[in-house]
Image: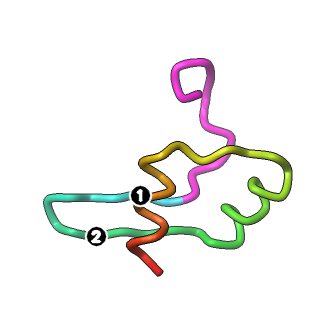
Amino acid sequence: SRREGRDLRKVGFYDPIKNQTYLNVPAILYFLEKGAQPTGTVHDISKKAE
């Protein structure tokens, strides 16, 4: 969790005011393959970006 430690790697951002989304898909897939669990918010943002 974000509160538990530092970022391992930044994999994207979402700016709701400018309606901008950037996702580093290869990095996201890497972490998912290693067992990372996206939060509900991250899951929703990734679905909207498809």
> Where is residue 40 shown, x and y percent of the image?
47, 46
Label 2: which residue? 20
Pointer 1: residues within 10 angstroms few (<14), some, or many (20+)?
A: few
Q: Are marks 2 and 1 in contact (CB under 8 Å)?
A: yes
Residue at image location 42% in from the left, 48% down from the top: 41
Structural distance between the alpha carbons of marks 2 and 1: 8 Å
Q: What residue type is labelled 1?
A: Phe
Left or right of 33 in this view: 23? left
Q: In this view, does 12 lie above or below 24?
A: above
Q: Is residue 33 above or below residue 9?
A: below
Q: Is residue 14 magenta?
A: no
Q: Which amino acid does label 2 sit on?
A: Gln
Q: Which residue lies furthest to the bottom in this view?
A: 50
Foreground residue, 33 or 22?
A: 33
The residues colored magenta run: 1-11
Q: In this view, does 1 lie above or below 7?
A: above
Q: Which residue lies furthest to the top in this view?
A: 4
Residue at image location 62% in from the left, 22% down from the top: 5
Q: Which residue lies furthest to the right in this view?
A: 34
Label 1: which residue? 13
Image quarter of residue 30: bottom right
Label 1: which secondary element: strand
Foreground residue, 7 or 45?
A: 45
